[in-house]
Structures are given as structure tokens and as C-alpha cells.
Amino acid sequence: MAIKSFPGKEAIQTQGWLKAHKWLLLRRASQIGILVLFLLGPLAGIWIVKGNLSGSMTLEVLPLTDPFLLLQSMLSGSVPILSGAIGALIVIAFYALMGGRLFCSWVCPVNLVTDLAAWLRRRFDLRGNTSLSRNLRYWILGLALLFPLLTGVIVWEYVNPVSMFHRGLIFGMGTAWVVVLAVFLFDLLIAKHGWCGRLCPMGAFYGLLGSGALLRVSAAQREKCDDCMDCFEICPEPQVIKPALKGADNCVGPVILDINCTNCGRCIDVCAKGVFRFDSRFHNREGLPESCSKTQTA
Amino acid sequence: MTDLAATKKKGVTRRRFMGDVLKTAAGVGLFGLGLGLYSNRASSLPAHFIRPPGALPEDAFNGACIRCGLCVRDCPFDMLYLGEVGQSVPTGTPYFIAREKACEMCEDIPCVAACPTNALDHNLKDINEARMGLAVLVDQETCIAFQGLRCEVCYQICPIKDEAITLERQHNERSGKHALFIPVVHSEACTGCGKCEEACILEEAAIRVLPQRLAKGELGKHYRLGWKQKERAGRSLVTPDIEHQYNLPQGMRYEHGGEGLIQDGAGEIPFSDNPLDTLNREAPR
């Protein structure tokens, strides 16, 4: 059985393999590079970064704290110390500017797992899908924040595959493999983009955090779009593309402003026409006719 | 038809919307219930898993700790671990096992300094004030000090020797002529570092660090110890003490401090060296 057409095939033919995978390669380099930084200490004794994604210390000067976890900790009644609070503020500032879900696609280790599941789905044309609302993640986010408030315990951390996987790689897996495998199988066989796109409250939190982010993907050359659907096929949050790509007639600007765009840049890679590029959210009015009033553009 | 028109206009009917919200809420609620029940079990910490110095009480700790592992990394003796999934420790939280490697009680307490939250209480400045647990000599039947053998390893290794652990001398009933040197732990000084448990020479340690809640009894709040109250007040608070009167022969007294019966003029020899003096003495009148 020959492999059917896959998203990005045309881009590879017209732009070359490297250019058609540019952002994917950069993203993998970032994900793996961050993991390597964390692992250099325990494996090679080179302590550049200590800790894990929940809280870390870089070169003994730069504290970084996961604001989602720190918020849960504070809701349980605990007060962070200065370095913990500063660490969280640095992280908040970064993702608020660069796009909250940049964390999901450029940092989070679970993305490697769910991307693999998504790739296998495309490769073997697996269509099994349970319809779960993409808003379910906000319910779970509420639940994760409610628990420490009511019980005084960070309950989400008992099941959170993200921190479990990252901590496991650095401090010892235990049986966390089972949880990661469950996420993989869930994404592969039960729900397309099921974990990252529908359930993960961390993604929901970071998405909300970056709702005003400056760095966005823009369908700047949307008039060149030939409706090949490759970007929709490859995108982990395809619902974010349509308003920007197809919004010219409705006076919607070309910048993807949906908070759930992960800034992964795969749409840029797979588009043979070069429709997409990284841009600032302020360039959303470019190319809009004068007749469009200000209120209709974000 | 009006319903259909509304559907077309708004996308969903109110009925459908309410139904979807209720369905999701019920699903998430059930998931939350399961999670809550699981968390109850997942929060429990077995007695031999000991938290690092300064750790808040267990419930508060499970709320404050963000599982970053910085305490583990900054421990210069590598004796802290993070709970792994599947272990009976709350996942990702730090612990040590005294029998394997005890706390070395660093003066600068680097594990506390590394903690980005107050899960390890930053008010702890003096490691001697730490209360990781309390050492308890749990088995007097196997502790060889109770067999009359000189061991004293726990006493010698204790970082706060002679305060946290003292040796109390007792009579050895078995031999009748030897002493037992019994190690006794004092809770007002013991930090629960676990050096005694680590060092205990038995196959299974006879002295173990237990969580305070397991190791300590507690006297009823209403309870007053008479002699302490008396000491504090400077006098007896109940019936005033009346000096006891004894009907003793002339020349004899009784001393309550421990000397007991005292005979005045004891030490003088009551009889002359010469037996004739006794024989020729006058009869008492």
C-alpha cells in the first residue's frame, strides 16, 4: 500500500525537505535541548539546571517556577518565598509575551508523545475518534484549582502526566511510564489530539496566560491559499486557523489570535504556498480594506 | 418550527446547551470524585518515609510542595529522594529513609534554602530545632544494651549526644553484679535525623525514627502533676504539709531526706571496754 498524500508533501516538493520541516526541527531541538539541560546534571554531573519543569534553578541565579503549580500551592494556603514567586513571574512574563501554549509545543515533553501518536494516526490513517469537547480542559482546570482550595492538597499532581513524565525522566520514572503510555494510546486510538487538545489543564492554563501574547502565527499571505487543507490536517488545534485564514471577507485580520494556537509553526512548514509566518499580533489589520471598521478586528 | 428557527439562528437551542453543560458537569464531577478518593489514599505517607528538615505537617506539606526536587539536588549527601509513581509516597514529594541514609544535619540546611515554597519552612534557622520525627527504642527484647552488652552505638553516633540520647544505668538482674547501659531518647532534643537508626548494629534496627504523631503520647489537658504544681507555686496547693510526728525513743530522730532513722550520739561507744564496768553498773532507777 503506497502512502497516500500526507500534509506537507507538496511543500517538500516545492520548498525542499529542510524548509518544509524547519519549525518542526527547531521545536524538537528546543524540546530535546531543554530535556538535555535538565539531564546533564544527574547523568553527567554538569549542573546547569537543577530541578524540573515544576521548579528549577539555573546556574544558581535564575529561578523558574511553574505558575500553574505555584497557584495550586497558594490556593492550598501556602505562601511561596521570594525566589519561588520571582521564578513564577519570570515564567508568566515570558509566556504572556511569547504565547502561552508555546510551552506545550516547544517545552512540554508530553508533546513528543502526543505528536508521535498524531503522526501514527496520519501515517496509518487511523480514524477512530471519540468526540470530546475542546472546552473540557477548562473544566478540568477548574477542578485542578478547586481541589487545593477545598482539600488543601495539590491533587492534580497525583495524576498529572506532564510533570510525572518530566520528573520521571530526571528523578526516576517508577511506573509513570504507564501514565505516559495511557496518554499515547488515548491520543492514538481513542481521541484525536485528545490529551493536549481537549483535556490537559496545564495547556488550558498556559493558553489563558498567553491570551494577549505578542508573538502569533499569521496567515499573512492568505490570498495565496489554494485550500489544500494541509495546515488543518497537521495543526493540533485546527479550529484556530479558520477565522484568520478564511476571515478576509468578514473583516477578520490574518493573525491567529485564538489562545489555543500553540505557536508550533507546523502550518508554516507544510504550506506550499507560504501563506503563514510568525508575526506580531499588532499586524492584524494589514491587508484589510478600509471599509472594515475597527470594532470587527481584534 | 419556532424551535428549529431558533436552532438555525443561535446554533444550539437552550435545551441542547443546558443538556451539554449538565452532561459535561456530571462527567467532570464523577472524574473529580474518583480523583478525590484516589488523592485521599495517595496522600498517605508510611511511617518509615521521613520528610526533610523543616517540612510542614503532612497535610500542609502536600498542599505546599510543588515537587520540583530542588531540595533533593541541594542535599550535599544525596540522601533525599522524590517519590516515584507507584511508590507509597505522595508522587514527586521528597523523603528519606533513615535506615538507608540518615540526615547529616547540615548547619546551613541547604535543602530548606533550596525550597521555592514554604513546604520546607524557611523559618527553620537552627537544624537542632528540626523535628523530622522522633527516635524510639522500639524493641527492648533485641536491643543488646538490654542484654547487658556494651553497644551504645546509637548513643555515640547521635549528633546531639547526651541531650537527644543519654545512657541510663540500670542494675543487671541476670548477672546480679553488672550494669545495663540503656539508651534513652529525649524528645525535647531529638531532631529525628535518623543517625541512630542508620547505625543500629542489629539486622533490623531496634531504634527507629517514627513520625511525632506515632511516637509521642499526650497527657490529658486536665492533668496536673502535683509535685510540679507545688514547685511552681512554692507551696502545696492542696492540704498543707504537716510535719509528721514519730513516737521515737529518746535520742532518736527520723530524717525525710533519705537518711532515715538517726540515733543521736551514734558513734559513741555505749559500753566500756572493760566488761567489769558493765557488770558493776548501777541499775536504772
Image: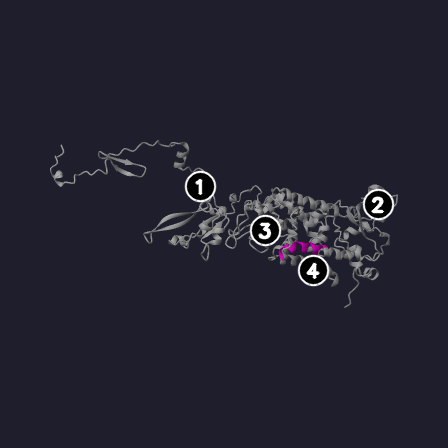
Q: Chain of mark 3?
A: B
Query: Label 4 sits on what residue type?
Result: Leu
- Respond whether the residues carrying marks 3 and 1 are from the same subunit: yes
Residue furthest right as drawn:
A290
The answer for how far apart the CA atoms under marks 3 and 1 are is 37 Å
Residue B197: x percent and y percent?
48, 52
3 or 1: mark nearer the eye: 3
Which label sits on residue A207? none
Q: Main secondary structure of the magenta part?
A: helix
Residue under label 3: B72
- Respond whether the residues carrying marks 2 and 4 are from the same subunit: yes
Residue A18: x percent and y percent?
79, 60
Residue A228: x percent and y percent?
83, 58
Query: Label 1 sits on what residue type?
Result: Leu
Query: Label 2 sits on what residue type?
Result: Arg
Residue B23 can be seen in this image = no
Q: Is residue A229 above or below residue A64?
A: below
Residue B256: x percent and y percent?
31, 36
Q: Secondary structure at mark 3?
A: helix
Residue B249 can be seen in this image = yes
Residue under label 1: B219
Give, as a single range, the part of the protein colored magenta: A30-43
- Respond whether the residues carrying marks 3 and 2 are from the same subunit: no
**How crowded is the residue under tag 4: few (<14 C-alpha within 10 Å), some, or many (20+)?**
some
The answer for how far apart the CA atoms under marks 4 and 3 are is 38 Å
- Respond whether the residues carrying marks 4 and 1 are from the same subunit: no
Query: Label 3 sits on what residue type?
Result: Val
Task: Compare residues A229 and A61 and report the one nearer the observer.
Answer: A61
Residue B197 left/right relative to B115: left
Task: Compare residues B148 and A163 and report the one nearer the observer.
Answer: B148
Q: Chain of mark 4?
A: A
Residue under label 4: A189
